[in-house]
Image (cartoon, grey):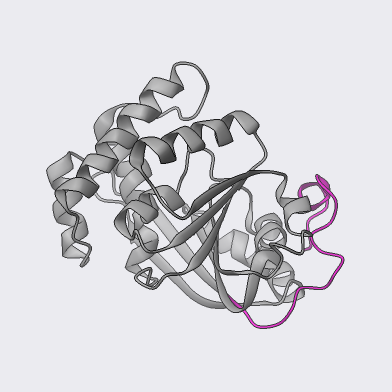
Amino acid sequence: MNVDQFQSMLAEKGITLSPSQLEQYNQYYETLVEWNEKMNLTAITEREAVYLKHFFDSISAAFYFDFTEPLNICDVGAGAGFPSIPIKIAFPNINITIVDSLNKRIHFLEHLAKELKLENVRFIHDRAETFGKNPQHREQYDVVMARAVARMSVLTELCLPLVKIGGTFIAMKAQSADEELQAGKKAITVMGGKVEQTHSFLLPIEESERKILLVKKVKSTPKQYPRKPGTPNKTPVE
C-alpha cells in the first residue's frame, strides 16, 4: 500500500488526512525503522507493508467505532504503538494511555511522541495484570483496545477491568476470532462484558481476513480480576 492508496482508501471510509497528518505517518515510519535496527519492534519494515499491515490495519477500528469524540483510550500491550498511535494521528482529539511490560518499548514510544509532537498521550511501564488493579486506572477508560496481544479469553481479563461501565473493549483479531470468541464467552461475561458487535473485513491488497470485536462493559468487574501476572495466560477463564 503506497501513500496515495493509504490516503484514498481512508478517504473512502470518511477519514480525511491533512498534509501534516501524512507527514506524521511518514515520520512514524522513519522512526520505527531507525529504532528497529537497535531493538526488535517489528518484523515488518518495508514502507508499503508498514502502511498496510500496521497503519491502515490499526485505523480500521475507526471503520466500526466513532473516534471523533475526545475519548480516554487505553491500549494494552501496544508494542511499537499499534493500534492507538495511528488512530491518534488520524483523530488528534482522543487521549491515549499505552501500557506495555517492556521498558525499552516505552522509551521508543516516548521518543516517537516527541518526534510527532503528539499531545495527550502517556506511556506506562507495567504488566496489564497489575495495571488493571490500580485504582487510578481501573474502570477509568471509555475505550480499551488491544491488537494481536493474546487469545480472547486471556485478553478479556487484561482489558475489561480497565473499561468504565458503559464503555467499550475493542479487540482487533485475525481469522481465528470466531473460535476465540466462543472460548472467551465465559470470560467476557465474568468480567462484566457483553459482545455488542463483530465485524469482518478483508485487509486491502493482500486480502487477509480481519475481525473487530466490540464488547460493551455492562457491569463492574469482580475485584479478584485480573489475577496475578501470568495466571490469565496459564489458566484462562473458559
Q: Position of residue 190 (x, y in %)?
A: 77, 73
Residue 137 relative to residue 209: left or right = right
Seen at 36% across and 43% down, the residue is 117
Residue 189 relative to residue 4: left or right = right
Residue 48 found in image quarter: top left
Residue 118 relative to residue 74: left or right = left
Let me know if residue 169 appears in the view: yes
- Whether residue 44 is situated above or below residue 227 in the rendered picture: above
Seen at 34% across and 58% down, the residue is 92
Residue 159 found in image quarter: bottom right
Please state, as top left, top right, bottom left or bottom right, where the N terminus lies in the image. Answer: top left
Residue 137 relative to residue 25: left or right = right
**The magenta segment:** 216-238
Foreground residue, 54 or 195?
A: 54
Q: Position of residue 137 (x, y in %)?
A: 68, 62
Q: Position of residue 109 (x, y in %)?
A: 49, 37
Seen at 59% across and 60% down, the residue is 179
Let me know if residue 208 appears in the view: no
Task: Give the total number of marks visible in the rendering.
Answer: 0
